[in-house]
Amino acid sequence: MNKEDICFMSAFEMREKIKSQELSSIEITETIIERIKEINPLLNAYCTPTFELAKETAEKADEAVKKGESLGLLHGIPTSIKDLMQTKGIRTTFGSKLYEDFIPEQDDIAVQRLIKAGCVMLGKTNTPEFGSIALTNNKIFGETKNPWDLERNSGGSSGGAASAVASGIGPLALGSDGGGSIRVPSSCCGVYGLKPTFGRIPSYPRIGIHFMSMDHYGPIVRYVKDAALMLNVMKGHHSGDNNSFPDDDIDYVKEVDETPKKLKIGYSMTLGFGKTLEEEVKENVLNGVQKFEEFDWDVEETNLKIKNPDSSYKTLVSIGYAYDLQKDYKNRLEDLTPDLIGSIRLGLDNTAMNIGKAREQRKRVYEVMYQYFKNYDILITPTLPCPAIKPGWLETGTVFPTIGKKALSITSWMTFTYPFNMTGLPAASIPSGWTKSGLPIGMQIVGKRFDEKTVLQVSKAFEEVAPWQDKRPIFN
């Protein structure tokens, strides 16, 4: 097996080969590290590598196999951690100069569970400042590039994670999603990203409150079954997170291969309020939807009508940033990125009535989806209205392209994703094809609350009829 094939192998296959000693964890880890050293200078996916720790962990993993010890679900598998999650003894910046030299004294509980399951930590992946925008760039590490076109951004805020997975420099990545931050970069980079139900994976400790009621942790991978593997490890209540709920006792790795006999799937190209969608993306996603008919599932266009929640979402996010960062806004303005400054200003200007209105609108979005899922099992939409973009926003302010005669904004860029942070529903982005110019297109699969199982099963079924893993980015 050549080195590139090892780098693009599924985590599930790696796990089996490590257990059988066909491949060692140290061999896999060193092969991937070698590739990171070669490719990461082009991509800037990893901001804080932990190579020595990774090698040490991999060697211990191999010793455990030889001794016949009990092995964790992720035993010896290289994994990356988004730089928004605290890692004990390892620099964690949150993409902000405010935390440029911060060394946490404890692991985030999700990180702790990954480590306990035996993963090999390759390092921290790049993110925008406090995950504040769906593009990855910050004042410490700079921009993370898209592996399919180095002139384009990887998306965000888990852009480093998605870029790494797509490039074969880590099969598993832990990301987070407060408005699309797992699904957006997964769509941009041509990988699979799952945002579970809010509370499925606990989050503790946290810095600030800005996304506290909408932020979900989840996996970014190249194979759907690998997402199930990570979900098995990270799910379940933790007393430090009062939003987390008890383990559902579902083995997602076993369940993911089961294809439901009956499903009713609705699809929407607007959600009732979206005004912009590239024709090539629309055609691609519609072609993807048709593939579900191969399973004898009922598939139809749905007349879903969500009232535009743009202002409500902005209010809910901005008041969190304003509360968290008001002192830094006054004293360290030069250290903050332009988009975050704008969000803080918006939050500081908001009134109690605006906040109440935003919360009421959030309730209405959930009510629309509650009524929808009385009649359907799954909702399909595009993940993004267009493929990865060329931003340059950090220095000049956010600049988004025009679709037809309509210019995109940050929220219209995330039209299809952020409503499902407001509702807390599980949602995934899966590659549905590529544009004529070779950029990935993502299709979003949304499920009922607590129903990650069906989302994963539908994702796996689609993966089987429309696999994408044979495509690999080329670096000259």
Image (cartoon, helix red, strand yellow):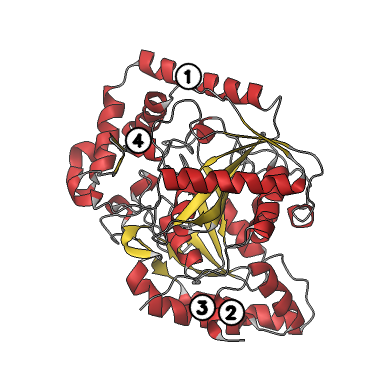
From the image, state whether disc 3 or disc 4 is nearer to you: 3
- Binning the other alpha carbons within 10 Å of mark 3 as few (below 14), some (14 to 19) or many (20 upward) gives many
Camera-side residue: 372 or 138?
372
Query: Looking at the figure, which quarter contains the N terminus?
Result: bottom right
**Where 342 sits versus 79, above or below?**
above
Q: CA distance from mark 1 to mark 3?
A: 46 Å
Camera-side residue: 336 or 132?
132
* Res. 346 image quadrant: top left
Q: Position of residue 440 (x, y in %)?
A: 46, 57
Q: Which label was assigned to residue 451?
A: none
- Binning the other alpha carbons within 10 Å of mark 1 as few (below 14), some (14 to 19) or many (20 upward) gives many
**Pointer 4 residue:** 321
Camera-side residue: 199 or 297?
297
- Binning the other alpha carbons within 10 Å of mark 2 as few (below 14), some (14 to 19) or many (20 upward) gives some
Q: The residue under label 4 is which amino acid type?
A: Tyr
Q: CA distance from mark 2 to mark 3?
A: 8 Å
**Where 351 sits versus 126, above or below?**
above
Tag 2 secondary structure = helix
Marks 2 & 3, CB-CB < 8 Å contact: yes
Tag 4 secondary structure = helix
Residue at image point 40% right, 51% down: 387
Q: Which label was assigned to residue 6?
A: 2
Q: Earlier in the sequence, mark 2 or mark 4?
A: 2
